[in-house]
Image (cartoon, grey):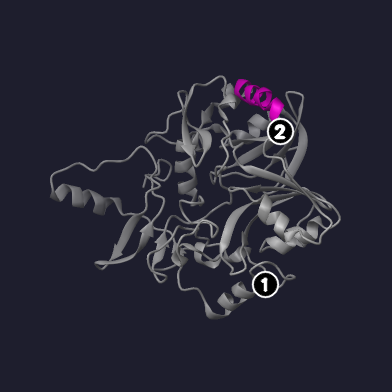
Amino acid sequence: MPRTPGCTPSSACPSSRRATIIPPRILNRRLPCPSEPRSTNALSPSAKASTIASGLAITPSASTKCTTSTSTTPSAISAALIDISPLYKYRVTGPDATRLVNRIITRDINKVAVDQVIYCCWCDSEGKVIDDGTITRLGENEYRWTAADPSLRWFQQNALGLDVQLEDISEQLAALALQGPTSGKLLHAAADASIANLKYFRVAHGKIAGVPVDISRTGYTGDLGYEIWVPWNDAVKVWDKLMAMGKIFDIHPAGMIALDIARIEAGLILIEVDYTSSKRALIDSQRFTPSEIGLGKLVDLKKENFVGREALAAEAKDGSERVLIGLEIDWNEVEAVYDKIGMAPQVPSMASRVAVPVYRGGRQVGKATSTTWSPTLKK
C-alpha cells in the first residue's frame, strides 16, 4: 500500500511486515489518561456530563449540551471547550535541564526558542517508543513536559549525575483545550493576552477572569485551537468565563466522544489505541520505532547522543519493516455490499477504538486501530 505523507502511529500488528492502518496525521497532540484516579468533572459545573474511565482516569465522555452524532463535531462548526487536565505534567528546571531533555527525547531541544512548544517522542534503549507528548520551553532552563503515562521515574533514571530538578505538577496545573474556528475570536474577547499574532506551537502569557494563564496555540483536533494552562484551584473560574463569553461564538462543552471523532478526522494518534508503549508491550511486535508509527521526522540523528540513538541509526540505514498509512473507505463500495443483502448501510455515531483486520486481495495486510465516520469530511 502506498504510504500517506505525515501518517500516524498505530498499535501492534500480528506480523512485523504487516501495515497498520489509520488516517493520515495533520497536527500533533493527544489527550491520554493517567494511571492514578483523577476526576475532571468539576471543571464543567454548568453542564451535566457522563464520564468514561480509561485506565483509572475519570474523564468527561459527553455533555448533555453537546451532540456527537453524525452531525459535525463542535470543534469543526464553532468552538469546543474540553477539559484535558488528565494529562501528566512535569516541570524540569536547573542548570542541566536542557541537557536532560535532550538526553531523553529524539528531537533537538537546542533548536527550540523560549515560549515555543514542540511535539516529540521518547524511546527506550532499543529505539522503541515509550510515549509521545509536548514540551514547552518556558525559560533557558525551564520546561513544561506533558505525557500520557506516568513518566517521572523514567526522567529521574536518566537524570542521574545531572544538576536538575524534576517536579510532577499534574495536580497543580489544570488544562483546557479551546478548539474550533471561532476559538481565536473568543479568546481575543475573553483573555487579557496578546494572541492576535500567536503562531502555531508558540505560547502567550496573560489572564482570563483575572487568573494568570499560559495560552499555547496547540490542540488535538486538527482545527484552529488553543490550550490554556491554569492553576488547578482557578480552573473552574476560567472555564465558566469562557463558557459565558462563548455563547455568542456558539461554544459547546465537549468530551472524549467528540474528541475521538475530531482527532481521527485529523489523523491524530492515541496511545494504547493506535500504538503501544514499549513499557507496556507484551510481545515484540507491539513495540514500535518512531518511523514505524509515522514519527520518523521527529528523530534528529545529528544531535548529541540520546536514549535509543544507536538503534534508530541502524534502522535509518536498513529501513523499517512496517509502515503506517492512512486509509479511506469508498462509501459507494460499502453501499454496494449492503445492497447485495438488501440492507441499508449504517453510519455509527461514535468512533471505534477496536482494532479490525484490513485485507487486500484476500490476505490480511494489517489492522485499522481507530475508525470513524467523518461528519466534517462526509466519508
Does the segment drawn in magenta span residue 66?
Answer: no
Residue 356 visible within the image: yes
The magenta region covers: 231-244
In this rendering, the count of numbered labels is 2
Calculate the distance from the C-alpha at mark 1 to the C-alpha at mark 2.
35 Å
Is residue 21 toward the left or the right of residue 204 in the image? left
Query: Dot 2, how many residues are within 10 Å of its Cα: few (below 14), some (14-19), or many (20+)?
Result: many
Q: Is residue 190 above or below residue 178?
A: above
The residue that appears at 50% across and 42% down in the rendered structure is 55
Tag 1–tag 2 contact (CB < 8 Å):
no
Q: Pick the residue in front: 345 or 9.
A: 9
Q: Position of residue 135 (x, y in %)?
A: 69, 51
Q: Is residue 38 above or below residue 323?
A: above
- Quarter where residue 376 is shown: top left
Q: Which mark is residue 126?
A: none
Quadrant location of the N terminus? bottom left
> Majority secondary structure of the magenta segment?
helix
Q: Disc 1 or 2, which lies upstream in sequence?
A: 2
Q: Is residue 205 above or below residue 162?
A: above
Q: Which mark is residue 230?
A: 2
Query: Dot 1, how many residues are within 10 Å of its Cα: few (below 14), some (14-19), or many (20+)?
Result: some
Q: Position of residue 86 (x, y in %)?
A: 59, 38
Q: Position of residue 252 (x, y in %)?
A: 52, 28
Badge 2 amino acid = Val
Q: Which residue is mark 1?
A: 301
Is residue 112 toward the left or the right of residue 65 in the image? right
Badge 1 amino acid = Leu
Is residue 233 toward the left or the right of residue 163 in the image? left
